[in-house]
């Protein structure tokens, strides 16, 4: 049996042989005096605490195997390496997140509620995007369609009007006067307050009742044109024109070199100076030149009328009739002496002075005539209520 080793004070076992490198021997702990304590005082455990302290091993009592020493030396280095690796992964993920986006689970990973919701949102966005693109394509296709032209009717047929005076007092038929706008355009000057709208006929007008005819045959059509502040009878009446009033109820002026196509049977008339536009001419007789007059003639009372005629020649003619009403309702009756359906325009009863320009297109055989009748239907009851007549032109 080996010899028992002597024990040191405090229960320590003495070392035999040289001390390991890095370890330092410590001497025995000095004895601590024992003080007396009262019974029940926590300090009564002093001797026991002192014994436990003396029984704890010192620093030289650590494990001395090579494996344990290497584990002690490399343990802190491993912890530092793991901490550095985690920090590097965190920084790398923060750098690559804006570029690569959030990491997605592998395709074979089990589906989760969050992944299912994300897939549903992606499908919904795809459907909405497809619907939006389809709607945009349909809208562009609809906007790119060529506009359809409305068919021309007798009520919307354009009316040719002369414009500028040609040398010798004549103007081409396809031009309009300087101060007169074509039928489908607004004039430069404003119409008087009593004049109806220039873009469309008044609501109390009735459409023409004439039927369409073959080209070259009889034709009758009428439209309401805007009435400007001034116009030239010389420019509008390239073939003939006539103006009433200005020098008495029975006076009139006509084109000096006119064809005489305009026929006026005359009758009882009164003179007025309440016209809505200034009428001018430079080729008249008995007054050769007029720079602007609003004179005309009128008849008082319901049932009174003016009757005119224009001779036909087989060619298309354009007649412009300038008439008015003084607090009366009136009607314009147009017909061809050769027969056929008439064309009618009617103006409802209204107080005040109103003036109109009717553009009539007709074609009649030589020897036939265009018959015009402008008569009062009703009046409001004033002394001078009735219908008025100012001028007529033929081109």
Image: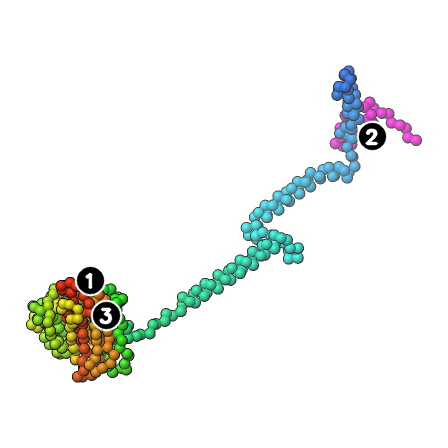
Could you tell me how far apart the alpha carbons at marks 3 and 2 are, in whole angstroms? 144 Å
- Quarter residue 348 falls in: bottom left
Q: Disc number at residue 288?
A: none
Q: Disc number at residue 17?
A: 2
Q: For the residue labelled by badge 3, is the local secondary structure a helix, a strand or a loop?
A: strand
Percent position of residue 356, x then y: 20, 67
Percent position of residue 368, x then y: 18, 82
Which image quarter holds the C terminus?
A: bottom left
Q: Answer left or right for 20 relative to 94.
A: right
Which image quarter holds the N terminus?
A: top right
Percent position of residue 21, x then y: 76, 32
Query: In the rendered view, would you say 267 is above or below 41?
Result: below
Tag 3 residue: 346
Q: For the residue labelled by badge 2, is the local secondary structure a helix, a strand or a loop?
A: loop
Residue at the spot 61% in from the left edge and 52% down from the top edge: 114
Query: In the rendered view, would you say 58 is above or below 234?
Result: above
**Taking the image as drawn, is residue 196 in sight?**
yes
Q: Main secondary structure of the magenta part?
A: loop
Q: Residue furthest front?
A: 381
Q: For the residue labelled by badge 1, is the local secondary structure a helix, a strand or a loop?
A: loop
Residue at the spot 11% in from the left edge and 76% down from the top edge: 257
Tag 1 residue: 351
Residue 311 part of the magenta segment:
no
Look at discs 2 and 1 and give the one toward the viewer.
1
Task: Choose between 242 and 210: the one closer to the eye.
Answer: 210
**Taking the image as drawn, is residue 238 in sight?**
no
Could you tell me how far apart the alpha carbons at marks 1 and 3 are, in whole angstroms? 15 Å
Q: Answer left or right for 64 relative to 188.
A: right
Bounds of the magenta span?
Answer: 1-28
Which of marks 3 and 1 precedes in the sequence?
Answer: 3
């Amino acid at each position: 049996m080996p010899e028992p080793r002597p024990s040191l004070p405090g229960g320590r076992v003495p070392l035999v042989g040289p001390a390991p490198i890095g370890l330092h021997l410590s001497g025995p702990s000095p004895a601590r005096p024992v003080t007396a304590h009262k019974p029940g005082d926590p300090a009564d455990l002093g001797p026991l605490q002192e014994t436990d302290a003396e029984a704890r091993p010192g620093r030289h009592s650590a494990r001395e195997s090579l494996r344990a020493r290497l584990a002690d030396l490399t343990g802190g280095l491993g912890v530092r390496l793991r901490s550095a690796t985690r920090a590097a992964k965190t920084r790398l993920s923060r750098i690559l997140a804006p570029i690569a986006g959030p990491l997605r689970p592998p395709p074979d990973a089990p589906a989760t509620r969050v992944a299912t919701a994300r897939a549903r949102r992606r499908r919904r966005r795809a459907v909405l995007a497809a619907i939006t693109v389809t709607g945009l394509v349909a809208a562009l296709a609809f906007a790119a369609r060529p506009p359809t032209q409305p068919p021309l009717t007798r009520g919307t047929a354009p009316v040719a009007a002369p414009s500028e005076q040609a040398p010798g007092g004549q103007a081409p038929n396809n031009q309009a006067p300087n101060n007169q706008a074509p039928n489908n355009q607004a004039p430069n000057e404003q119409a008087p307050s009593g004049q109806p709208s220039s873009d469309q006929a008044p609501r109390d007008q009735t459409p023409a009742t004439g039927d369409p005819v073959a080209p070259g045959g009889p034709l009758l059509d009428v439209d309401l044109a805007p009435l400007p502040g001034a116009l030239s009878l010389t420019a509008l009446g390239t073939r003939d024109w006539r103006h009433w009033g200005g020098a008495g109820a029975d006076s009139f002026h006509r084109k000096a070199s006119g064809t005489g196509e305009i026929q006026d049977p005359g009758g009882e008339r009164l003179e007025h100076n309440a016209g809505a536009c200034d009428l001018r001419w430079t080729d008249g007789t008995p007054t050769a030149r007029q720079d602007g007059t609003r004179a005309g003639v009128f008849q008082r009372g319901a049932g009174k009328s003016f009757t005119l005629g224009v001779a036909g020649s087989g060619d298309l003619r354009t007649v412009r009739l300038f008439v008015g009403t003084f607090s009366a309702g009136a009607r314009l009756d147009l017909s061809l002496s050769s027969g056929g359906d008439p064309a009618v325009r009617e103006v409802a009863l209204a107080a005040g002075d109103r003036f109109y320009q009717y553009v009539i297109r007709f074609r009649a055989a030589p020897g036939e005539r265009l018959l015009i009748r402008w008569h009062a239907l009703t009046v409001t009851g004033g002394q001078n209520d009735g219908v008025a007549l100012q001028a007529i032109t033929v081109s």
